[in-house]
Image (cartoon, rainbow, N blue to C red):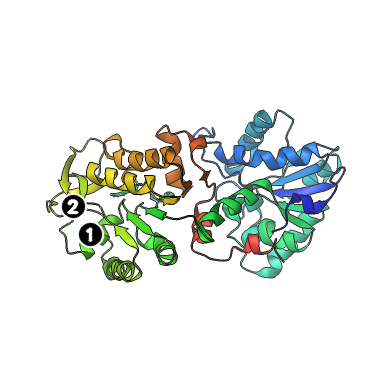
């Protein structure tokens, strides 16, 4: 993968950077988690310090190809300005007159943010020619391209993929770090290698399970998907989340794990409650003793200890998907146990998935104690599944 070094001396050059600024906003359009903006800083600092004239492109939300002020990047421009400690000019359009004028008036080391790239339907078009036409307009604004929006590199989009084919292009600091870290789990991982999977659905994670069951030494299953596996073992799971059409698949995974000598661990106890609510009275039962009228909302304390021990013994750990409904305090203990073990252990620890990363931050863990917290949900999963990411492949040709 080409890096920024391959672009040579950048002083005075116009560099088009794709960043991922798709941050959550509250009803008053205040940014509630600026993690993605902070993750974009190393590249932007490096380029401005090298004297480049930086043109930054990003999307926010789903404006569906229409100009819509509700999805303006204005809150991002403000926050970026605070974090960079330098002026960030926001163009009122993406490739229109204002963008062109503002790019033309940039001095060395200055930065302009273009308005939301998804205001233009061509950005995400399925028609190659439409995306390519937009990419040409982006390319006309700059001399080189840096891909740094890791959250979008699994998408074939004009500002991610097509532009990289037109301009001299390279991976930015964030994309490089993401690929470098995630590769530790896909090529020659240090063993024992443990994968912890949770979250709501088995069907969301089939690709990852398929791929990782071939390479991991241990698979720890929790979260909502665990109940489909427990059902596959013939247990009563009450009113827990169940994907009836995935029970057969779960059985196949259990068989495949045995066949391959992969240790597949399922919850041995579980926290149950009568309904899906923060104040629903919780109790703990063994996994094979769930009452018919209650639902499992977290792994139990014995399972938490078992999983923590497996993590502590591992040299590589990939975690995707919370162990329970961590948004409710009463059902957060399992997720905390896994996060704590990853934080305390000395293995290489990777957290992927939007909700898992949010859990780490919101439950008060120290992000710096994890080896890598990915900024990309879908992109990190697809990478771990072994898929080719178009936005990465295009930087390798
Ligand atoms: P990620 O974004 O990290 O990939 P997912 O989106 O797959 O994770 O899943 C996260 C969601 O799964 C959380 O909102 C959590 O509340 C939910 N969840 C976890 N355990 C359960 C459970 N036992 N029942 C229902 N939902 C669950
Ligand atoms: Mg999610």
For mark 1, give the secondary structure. helix
Q: Residue at x 75, y 64 (%)?
A: 165
Which label was assigned to residue 311? Answer: none
Q: Does residue 199 appear left or right of residue 375 in this picture?
A: left
For mark 2, give the secondary structure. loop
Q: Looking at the image, tell me whether mark 1 or mark 2 is earlier in sequence order.
A: 1
Query: How many numbered marks, from 0 up?
Result: 2
Q: Where in the figure is residue 229, as x and y percent of width and height?
A: 26, 61
Pointer 2 residue:
287
Tag 1 near tag 2, CB within 8 Å: yes
Quarter holding the N terminus is: bottom right
Q: Residue at x 25, y 40 (%)?
A: 277
Q: Does residue 297 appear left or right of residue 202 in this picture?
A: left
Q: Splitting the image into 4 quarters, where does residue 194 fall?
A: bottom left
Q: Splitting the image into 4 quarters, where does residue 112 fall?
A: top right
Camera sees residue 175: yes
Label 1 to label 2, Cα distance in Å?
A: 8 Å
Q: Where in the figure is residue 338, as x and y percent of width and height?
A: 36, 43
> Alpha-carbon neighbours of circle 2 within 10 Å: few (<14), some, or many (≥20)?
many
Q: Nearer the viewer, residue 194 or 48?
A: 194
Q: Where in the figure is residue 374, as x and y percent of width and height?
A: 53, 47
Q: Does residue 91 appear left or right of residue 52 in this picture?
A: left
Camera sees residue 242: no
> Alpha-carbon neighbours of circle 1 within 10 Å: few (<14), some, or many (≥20)?
many
Q: Nearer the viewer, residue 3 or 29?
A: 3
Quarter holding the C terminus is: bottom right
Q: Where in the figure is residue 191, as x and y percent of width and height?
A: 45, 55
Pointer 1 residue:
230
């Amino acid at each position: 993968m080409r890096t920024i070094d391959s672009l040579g001396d950048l002083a005075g050059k116009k560099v088009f950077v794709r960043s991922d600024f798709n941050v959550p906003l509250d009803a008053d359009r205040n940014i509630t988690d600026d993690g993605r903006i902070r993750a974009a800083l190393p590249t932007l600092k490096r380029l401005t310090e090298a004297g480049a004239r930086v043109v930054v492109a990003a999307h926010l939300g789903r404006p569906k190809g229409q100009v819509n002020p509700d999805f303006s990047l204005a809150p991002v421009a403000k926050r970026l300005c605070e974090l960079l400690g330098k002026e960030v000019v926001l163009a009122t359009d993406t490739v229109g007159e204002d963008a062109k004028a503002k790019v033309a008036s940039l001095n060395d080391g200055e930065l302009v943010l273009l308005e939301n790239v998804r205001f233009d339907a061509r950005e995400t078009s399925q028609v190659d020619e439409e995306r390519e036409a937009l990419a040409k307009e982006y390319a006309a604004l700059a001399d080189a391209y840096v891909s740094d929006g890791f959250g979008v590199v699994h998408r074939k989009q004009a500002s991610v993929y097509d532009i990289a084919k037109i301009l001299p292009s390279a991976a930015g600091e964030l994309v490089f770090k993401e690929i470098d870290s995630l590769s530790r789990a896909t090529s020659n991982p240090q063993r024992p290698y443990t994968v912890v999977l949770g979250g709501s659905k088995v069907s969301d994670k089939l690709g990852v399970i398929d791929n990782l069951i071939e390479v991991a030494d241990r698979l720890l299953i929790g979260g909502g998907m665990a109940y489909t596996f427990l059902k596959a073992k013939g247990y009563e799971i009450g009113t827990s989340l169940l994907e009836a059409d995935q029970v057969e698949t779960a059985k196949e995974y259990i068989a495949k794990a045995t066949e391959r000598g992969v240790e597949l661990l399922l919850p041995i106890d579980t926290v149950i409650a009568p309904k899906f609510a923060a104040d629903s009275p919780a109790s703990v039962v063994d996994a094979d003793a769930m009452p018919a009228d209650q639902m499992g909302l977290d792994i139990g304390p014995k399972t938490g200890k078992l999983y923590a021990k497996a993590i502590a013994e591992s040299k590589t750990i990939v975690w995707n998907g919370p162990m329970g409904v961590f948004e409710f305090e009463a059902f957060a203990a399992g997720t905390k146990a896994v996060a704590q073990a990853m934080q305390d252990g000395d293995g290489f620890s990777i957290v992927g998935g939007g909700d898992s990363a949010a859990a780490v931050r919101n439950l008060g863990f120290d992000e710096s104690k994890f080896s890598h917290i990915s900024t990309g949900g879908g992109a990190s999963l697809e990478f771990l599944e072994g898929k080719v990411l178009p936005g990465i492949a295009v930087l390798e040709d």
